[in-house]
Image: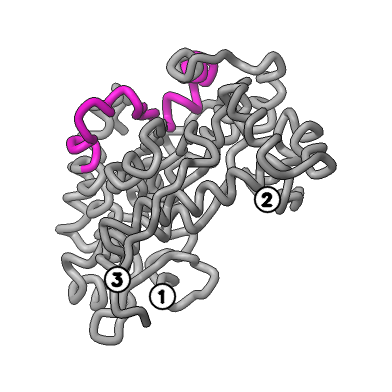
Amino acid sequence: MPEKRYPLYSQDAVCENVLLFDGLARAGKGLVGPLVSEFPGLDFAQLVHAADYIPTMWHFGLIDDEAAPSFLRMMIDTYSYQRIIGRNLNTRPGDIFTSVYKALDSDEILRRAEGEDGQGPVDQFNASGRYQSYITHETLPHADLWFRAFPELRIILTVRHPIDICFSWNSRGLGARLGSDPLAFTPVVDVDGEPVPLYAVDFPDEYVNATPIDRIVMCVLSMLDLYDKGVAEIPEGRGDQVRIVSFEHFATDTVAELEKLAAWLGTNLHPDMETAMTRERVPRKLDQSGRRQRREMLRDHVDEHLFKKLLERSNAYEAEWGLEPF
């Protein structure tokens, strides 16, 4: 180890125009990201887990304030460059929302692998003003770090009814998998030999001793608080670089929501957007009776105090987004 500690040097970015599709896991980014990233001027969204890991490790204090922005920038630069030259493309057809075969311009993306590499393609990409886009998880609470790494960053935050998020987490077994299932791909910290996720570090004993479904409700409520704090603390002058989208509005009034986001990004809808919308099964009708069933399932299995807090959060969400109470 060197005797003197040196900070990471911050280089010019490969691509300054970066767009994040963020939100809690299961909040609907997998719908919003693939559709919005079909806009002219955007590259089809990528899912890069390190984009979640670095801010989380910074939040835990495992990467310092000096190193984190440069490290994050270098990592995103790597993936942006690889996409620009067509390297390491996700060509797995069945992947839910990041297979390049889903993109309306997949042929153009695939052709990049046959072209040149180096600075030429980068200069050409940046001269066009295009955005590289990424799907992230639980990132907006770390917006300050991202803006330090990419001052021109844009963030689209997708929010969803808390009942639906909790139910979806439960269907994925997220109350038991974190720290025990290597395929969960979520950083957790070691608290007295027990794995604890970012959103439970303020109540580790309660989390460790809770049932899997109570853990889910605890964590979703905690993350919603972190997001509220993150939105309230968006750095001064950066407010217009963030947009919040309700999954319910996006799924049911898709064209209107897409048009608002296109105007914000200074572009328009892809001429073949209807094909992409058909692919994603939107617009669609959301069944209120299904949510009532999900609510009752949770009521039967979640601690009474936690369930009451979840209902309060749900009522507030419905009021904020003008949704019919169920």
Query: Upstream in the sequence, badge 3 or badge 2?
Result: 3
CB under 8 Å between callouts 3 and 1?
no
Disc 3 to disc 1, C-alpha distance = 32 Å
Q: Is residue 146 left or right of residue 259?
A: left
Query: Upstream in the sequence, badge 3 or badge 1?
Result: 3
Say what secondary structure mark 2 lies in.
loop
Q: Position of residue 89 (x, y in %)?
A: 71, 49
Asked which quadrant contains residue 130, the reply is top right
Magenta range: 230-259
Q: Which residue is mark 3?
A: 5
172, above or below 288, in the image: below
Q: Which residue is mark 1?
A: 179
248, above or below 51, in the image: above
Q: Which residue is mark 2?
A: 95
Disc 3 to disc 2, C-alpha distance = 42 Å
Find the residue positioned furthest to the bottom. Answer: 193
At x 37% / y 44%, what residue is drawn? Answer: 149
Q: Determine if the magenta segment contains residue 257.
A: yes
| Residue 214 visible to an observer of this rendering | no
Q: Amino acid at mark 1?
A: Gly
Q: Amino acid at mark 2?
A: Asp
Q: Position of residue 178 (x, y in %)?
A: 41, 70
- 10 Å neighbourhood of mark 3: few (<14), some, or many (≥20)? few
Q: Position of residue 119 (x, y in %)?
A: 66, 39
215, above or below 111, in the image: below
- 10 Å neighbourhood of mark 1: few (<14), some, or many (≥20)? some
Q: Position of residue 71 (x, y in %)?
A: 42, 56
Count of numbered circles on the image: 3
